[in-house]
Amino acid sequence: MARDIAKQIGITMAADSFVDERLLEKVPRWRNYLEAKLGFRNHWYPVKFSNEIAEGEVVKAKLMGEEILLKRVDGKIFAIRDRCLHRGVKLSEKVECYTRSTITCWYHGFTYKWDSGTLCDIIASPKTPIIGKKKLRTYPVEEAKGLVFVFVGDDGLEPHSLSRDVPHFFLDDDMVVFGSSYMVRSNWRLGCENGIDDLHIYLHRQSPLIVNTQRSLPLGHTDRPDDYFELYEDADGPKGVGTRKFRDAKPMAYEGVVEGKVVVTGTKMHASPEEAARKRTTGHFVCLPGVLRVDNFPYVDHVQFEWYVPVSEDEHLYIITIGKRCVTEEERVEHEHQFIHRWKPNALEGFNNEDVFAREALQPFYNNDANWLEEVLVREDHGIVLWRELCHRHSTGVQKPSDIV
Amino acid sequence: MARDIAKQIGITMAADSFVDERLLEKVPRWRNYLEAKLGFRNHWYPVKFSNEIAEGEVVKAKLMGEEILLKRVDGKIFAIRDRCLHRGVKLSEKVECYTRSTITCWYHGFTYKWDSGTLCDIIASPKTPIIGKKKLRTYPVEEAKGLVFVFVGDDGLEPHSLSRDVPHFFLDDDMVVFGSSYMVRSNWRLGCENGIDDLHIYLHRQSPLIVNTQRSLPLGHTDRPDDYFELYEDADGPKGVGTRKFRDAKPMAYEGVVEGKVVVTGTKMHASPEEAARKRTTGHFVCLPGVLRVDNFPYVDHVQFEWYVPVSEDEHLYIITIGKRCVTEEERVEHEHQFIHRWKPNALEGFNNEDVFAREALQPFYNNDANWLEEVLVREDHGIVLWRELCHRHSTGVQKPSDIV
Amino acid sequence: MARDIAKQIGITMAADSFVDERLLEKVPRWRNYLEAKLGFRNHWYPVKFSNEIAEGEVVKAKLMGEEILLKRVDGKIFAIRDRCLHRGVKLSEKVECYTRSTITCWYHGFTYKWDSGTLCDIIASPKTPIIGKKKLRTYPVEEAKGLVFVFVGDDGLEPHSLSRDVPHFFLDDDMVVFGSSYMVRSNWRLGCENGIDDLHIYLHRQSPLIVNTQRSLPLGHTDRPDDYFELYEDADGPKGVGTRKFRDAKPMAYEGVVEGKVVVTGTKMHASPEEAARKRTTGHFVCLPGVLRVDNFPYVDHVQFEWYVPVSEDEHLYIITIGKRCVTEEERVEHEHQFIHRWKPNALEGFNNEDVFAREALQPFYNNDANWLEEVLVREDHGIVLWRELCHRHSTGVQKPSDIV
C-alpha cells in the first residue's frame, strides 16, 4: 500500500538504485540494463594484465565502484577490498605487509589474511574479542591468457567457470593473446554499444589501419538479412549476441551519398574477390559481462577480444587484446613482435582510438539517465536492442549503491 | 488529489522545473521570473556579432542551456541544435559539411539540412526508413544592426517580429551600433537587475569613464517622484519598465555620509547647469527577454543597448553595444573610431567591468534559490520589483529542464 | 498525520538538516552528534591567534559554514557576518571602512556598525526608512591566552563564560600557551575522534617526537580497567570525557604480533622506571565544542590543548597549542623558544602531521553519512562512543542549513 500511495502521488520511493524508478519502468524489456550503470554482479572481469602484478607486489584497482587491492603470493593472486573494516580507511594509503599472507592497516594495526579476508590480528589491541570473527570482502581471482580476472559476486555464491564470461575460442589452448589497457571517460555500456554498432565503421573510414592492412572498408550497410543476428543463451556458455558469418550476407555501401551526390567513398581494394573476402571481418560476438570478439580482425587469421570494464559511472577500463592461434614458440614470438610493432600502434592506438573518441563523445548525452529514452535508434541498431534485452534477461544482479557503500 | 496529498505531507512533486515548487509558491507575483533561471522562451536573443560568422563558417553557441550551431550560407545564417538525433553526440565534435546546405554527423553519417533540420541522408545506412521523416530542432535567425538574433521558440510557433524584443529606437534606420561581448559568471537575471539598479552608481564613483567624459556622477538618490517608473505593456511593442526623463526629477546625493560625517563625494562638474544637464544620463528602459537601453550614455547623444543572454544557470553572455544616430558615412566611420578608441576601453571595459564584478559577486548568494526570499530590498529597489512582476505577467514560457534534455 | 503518511511510504520529509532523518533515527543515543556535521551552536570557538589581527586590520574567517569578518578597534575585536543584508554580497570583496567603528558595502554603500551590526547609513540612499532598523549578525568575541574566540549563538542568547568551553587548566593564570593552526581536509568530528582514540598510537610509532624526547611509546593496549573513563557533566564546567590517570592502570602492548610472531615493536626506553613514568602521557580530556587536552605531552610538565574547529562539511581548522606553567618572564621566554625550535617542528609538524594524514584518510568514508553506521568499532573505541553520546546529551543546538542560508 505504501508503494501505491507513492506511485499515485508521483513520487519515487527512496530505493537502492543508481537510476530513477520512473525511468526504469518505461523500459520493461531492458530495465536491468538501464539500471546497470556500474555493471552486473556475479561475473568475472579482467582488471590487470598478469605482468602488471609481480611476485609480492600489492596493486590497486577499481572495479564497479569498489576499490580493491591485489597481491601475488607464490604466484597466486589474491584480492581483497581496499577498506579497513574498522573505520573505513584505505589500506593502500600506506601498505604494510608484515607477513606474506597478511596485510595490516597503517592506522590501528588491523591485520587481514589475503586468502580469506579474516581479521587475524589487531596490533594495537591484541586481545579484542572480534579478532577472528570478522572478514574483509575478498574476491575470487583467476588468471588466463595473461589477464587477471576478478569475480565480483554475492556473499556465499560460488563463482561459475570463467568460460561462461568470455567469448568462445578465447580460452582455447592454442589461442595466444597480447594486449593493452586504456582508461576511457565513458560509461561501460557505451563501450559495448559502440563495439557492436554495425554502422560506426563510417567513423573509421580514414583509419591508418585500413591502409596498413590493405583491406576494404565500406562506409555502412544498405540492408541485412532477417537472420543476421544469433542469440547465445545456453545455460553453460556465455550469454551473448553474435552475427552470422556476414560474407556476402550484408550488402555494403561504399559510396556516401548526400542530396543525391556521392560525397565520400569507402576503401575498396582492387584485389581479387578471393583476397578481398579473405581480408574481411567475418563476424562479431558480444557477451556478458561486457566483452566483444571480432573475427578476422585486425587482420587475416587474427581475432580481437576487448573488454569494457565498469570502473565508475563515467569511466571504464578498455582492455584490448589481439589473439592468434599459435602452435610453436616461433609463432608465439612472431605474434608478439607483430602485436608490439604493428597492431598496438595501428589497431589499438590507431583504429580503436577513434572508438574511444566516439564513446567519450556519447557520455555527456547518456550521462543523463533520462536521455536513454530520448535517443532515436534506427533499424540497423537492432543488434544494440537485442544486446540490451539479453543483458536484462540474463542479469545475475545489478551493482547497487548498497554494494559500494 | 495526488497533488493534494503531496502538499499535505510537505513534499514537492517531481516537477519539470529548475526551481523548487515550495519557493515558487511564496512569490505569486513574480513566480515565473524566479523560475526562469535559464530565461524565457519564445524570444529573440543575440548570440553573436554578424562579423563573427563569415560566409561558410560553422560556429558554436550556447543559449538558454541549449547547444546550437550556426552557419552562414549565401549570406543567410541558419541555426540548428548541436546534437545528433540518433545518439546525442555533438555535431561540433568534428564538423563535416559535404554540401553547402547540409551538415553530417561524424559518427554514423546522419545528415541534416541547415534550413529545415530534416534528416535527409544517412551515409552509413542509406536506405533506413526514418530518412526524411525526422528533423533536428532549428532556430529562426535574423540579423539586425550587426547582431545575430536567434529565436528560441516552441514547436510550430511562428516567431514574432524582432521589434517586440528590443528596446525602442534600436532598429531605427539611422541608429548605428558597435559593440563587444563578454562571458560573465552570473545568472542573467543578476545582469538585468544590476543594470536597472538606481543605486549601484555608488559602485562606479571612481570609474575612468567619469573623468574621461567630464560628466557628473552622484553617489545615489535621496528620493523619487511617485510616477518615476512607467510600464510598457502594449501588445505590439517590447514589454518593459522605463524611467521617465529624470532630469531634475530625481534628487541626487553627491555627498556620502556615515555617522553624520561626509566621508566620500560624488563627481560634480563645475560646468554651466546647461552643460551638466546635457551630459546627464536621461533615462533607462529594460525589456524582455533581458535587454537594457540607457539614454544619453556613455556620452551626449549616445545610447547604450546591452543584453544579458542566458547561457547556463550561472553564466550569461553580456553583449554591450553603443548606438548613435548617423546619417552620413563619415558620421558612421567617426562613430566606429570613437567606439574602438574611446568607448570600448572607457565604457565597456572601464565602467561596465565594474558591473561585471558586482554581478559575479552576487552569484554565490542568488545561486541558492532560497536566497531570493532572503534579500532585503529597499524602497529604491522598486524598479527591480516592477521588472520581476512584469516578466512574470508577460512570460511566454519559462525554459524548463525538459527543453534542454 | 502528515509525518505519519510520509513515514509509512518511506519518504523523508524535507527537513532543515544536513543529514537524512532515516539515518538519524537509527542512532538515538548520539543522533545530535551525527547531525552536527557543521558543529554545535552556542559555543565559543577559536578562529585566529591574537597576533593575526593587528589594530585596525579587517580579517576574514569561516566558522561552521558562516563567513565572518573580524576587526580590531582600539584593541578590542569585533565580528560580523561577511554578507550584506541587501543583496547578499560579501563585504570582504572590497573592504571599505570610512570610520573606525563602521564598515560600508562596496556595492550600494550599506554601512554597518562593527559593535552592534546596526545598519546605520546607506550612502547611495541616505533617506531610506530601513536605516537604523536592521542589523547584520554579530558575534561576541573574547581573547584569551593569545587566541581569538568567537561565540556562534542563537539570537538573544547571552553567551556563557568561556571557561565552560575550554578544558580545565587552560585559563589558569600561570598557564602560557603558544601554537599554530592548520587547515585540515576532514570533518571536525574526525579530528576529535582521532584525538581521543586510544589505539591510534600505533600510527605514531616512528614519529620523530619519540626519539627527540626519549620517551616510551607502546603500540597499543591490551586491556583497560572498567573505571578508566570519567564523564564531566557539571552545569558550570566544560562537558567532556576524560581518562583517569593511567599510569600503571592501562596494560600496554610493546610488541606487535601477527600470526603469532612479533613483527614490530614499540619504543621502550631503558631508563629507570621512575623516569619512564615521569615521561609518560598521563591522561586526556575532550570537551565540547571540540577541544582536547593531553597531559604531560609532548613533554614532561607540558600540556597540549588542541581544537578541531568546524569550517565546512569537509574542513576543520586544527589549532594546536602547547601550554606550560610559567611564573617568571624568563620561563615564558624559554617556553616560547622551546615552542618555536622544538615543539613546532617535532610535535605539531612531526607527530601531529601524522594525525592530519589519518583524519584526511578517514574523510572519504565518513563523508557518506550512511557510513557512520557501517564502521566496526572495537571494545577499545569505547571512549569515542562515550564522547558521541555526551555530545548528544549536551547539545545546545546543531548547526542547520537554515543557519548558514
Image: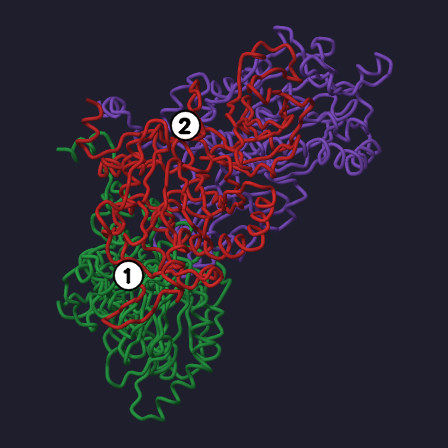
Chain colours: A red, B green, C purple
Circle 1 Cα neighbour tier, 10 Å, few/some/many (<14 / 14–19 / ≥20): many
Classify residue C183 as left or right of residue B291: right
Classify residue B140 as left or right of residue B273: left
Quarter of the view holding residue B104: bottom left
Q: Position of residue C213 (x, y in %)?
A: 81, 26
Vertical comparison of B42 with C83: above or below: below
Does the image show residue A105? Answer: yes
Question: How far apart, in angstroms, are the residues tagged by discs 2 and 1?
Answer: 38 Å
Vertical comparison of C295 with A377: above or below: above
Secondary structure state at the residue bearing disc 2: loop
Quarter of the view holding residue A369: top left
The amino acid type found where label 1 is placed reads Phe
Circle 2 residue: A42
Q: Quadrant of the C terminus of chain A?
A: top left
Circle 1 residue: B110
Q: Position of residue C24 (x, y in %)?
A: 40, 23
Classify residue B399 as left or right of residue C281: left
State which chain disc 1 sits on.
B
Circle 2 Cα neighbour tier, 10 Å, few/some/many (<14 / 14–19 / ≥20): many
Quarter of the view holding residue B51: bottom left
Q: Nearer the viewer, residue A381 or C181?
A: A381
The amino acid type found where label 2 is placed reads Asn
Does the image show residue B227? Answer: no
Q: Quadrant of the N terminus of chain A?
A: top left
Q: Residue at x 27, y 57 (%)?
A: A251
Q: Position of residue C222 (x, y in %)?
A: 67, 11
Q: Position of residue C156 (x, y in %)?
A: 43, 33
Q: Residue at x 57, y 13 (%)?
A: C231
